[in-house]
Amino acid sequence: MSGTIAKSGQRSDPDAVTSLENIVDLRSDTVTRPTPEMRRAMGEAEVGDDVYGEDPTVNKLERRAAKLFGKEAALFVPTGCMGNLIAIKTWTHHGDEVICDEKSHVNLYELASMSAIAGCMPRIARGVDGILSWKMIEGVIRPKIYYDSQTALICLENTHNMAGGTLYATAAVDEICGHAHAVGLKVHLDGARIFNAAVALGESVATMTKNLDSVMFCLSKGLGAPVGSMIVGSAAFIEKGRIYRKMFGGGMRQAGVIAAAGLLALEKSPGRLHVDHENAQVLAKGIAVMPGLKIDPTKVRSNIVIFDCEGAGKTAVESCDLLREKEIWALDTATYSVRFVTHCDVDRAGCERALEALKEIVAKPQIARA
């Protein structure tokens, strides 16, 4: 277990961090800080009580998100996990099953909320690099038999976090939706990084998600807002989702203060995401030539870089600890898997520093284990 970056906790000792000025933080794109323009917008935001539907800035953000995705309505929620849970709860009943990829975020990193709160069970399908096809999904749909639990929902993830930011082709999503709807199933997209996918594919989010029943996307990852996510879908879906948001403790009152930053993120940040993708390629290509490390740069399509360090004789936790000593923060995602995520607060020079630090630790002798 890492002394500074716990295996799954991802927490640092706040008293040990005196300055972030020299840190290259590649743990996640959740660590971005609001721009000065966002801070000004937050300070000047017009606000009201959002639980009463009276916050004009939140209402503006929701209208804008719905329009961008070509959906009837949208809802501002505190987190992506809550957004996914609201969608799952809206589309299912207790005892239903939700088909998702084995390494999907809703299966691994949302504290089993689909079971604990929505009363559903994940029904696992094993995708190729996290990407499911209709054939894979069809094979795990429950038959219509009264003594079997029933399939109610399919959850896709685009980009796919734990597969290294892999992408769904829009045609594949459309095929899944077409077949799913034909057999009475809904399809929800965990699109936490959907704008990264849109930039990588050169398509609009409206085109990519037109046949999906609901979409969640984050404002607080690559788009750089300090907090918040959105769910979009039909007016009826959002009306029911608003009830569950309140039930789950997500009514935020004068939320326009944070929605103002979200509006700026939505309008301005997608235009710079290609820079993060280019920096991810720099990292991937640099890692690929280091002895003992394994990665295929051609599979790095967005801003997530996951590499295998087993050949270097160190675990991922050990590698992350050694990187941290050089002020490079990374995340262990499995015993020998290290993740770098590029974002607006890491520039090309920071990526070069990360590669130089990684090169140095790979050259160190293997750590002796008891």
Image (tube, rainbow, N blue to C red):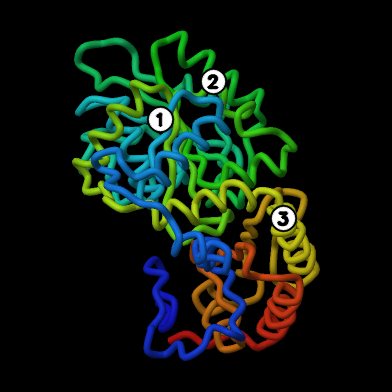
Which quadrant is the N terminus positioned in? bottom left
Sooner in the amino-acid sequence: mark 3 or mark 1: 1
Residue position for label 1:
99
Residue at image point 39% right, 43% down: 56
Query: Do the residues under discs 3 and 1 have CB atoms within 8 angstroms?
Result: no
x and y percentages locating residue 240 in the rendered image: 27, 27
Say whether disc 1 or disc 2 marks the residue closer to the N-terminus: 1
Give the secondary structure at mark 3: helix
Q: Which amino acid, mark 2?
A: Asn
Q: Is the Cβ of the residue at disc 2 closer than 8 Å to that at disc 3?
A: no
Please tell me which residue is depicted at 64% across the width and 42% down the height of the picture.
Answer: 197
Q: Amino acid at mark 3?
A: His
Instruction: Look at discs 1 and 2 and give the one toward the viewer.
Output: 2
Q: Is residue 312 above or below residue 157?
A: below
Residue 120 pos. (x, y %): 26, 33
Which SS class for mark 2? loop
The image quadrant of residue 143 is: top left
Residue that label 3 marks: 277
- x and y percent of residue 134 in the render? 55, 21
Quickly name the residue at label 2: 211
Disc 1 marks a residue whose amino acid type is Ile
Which of the two discs, 2 and 3, labels the residue nearer the N terminus? 2
Q: What is the C-alpha distance between the residues marked 3 and 1?
A: 29 Å
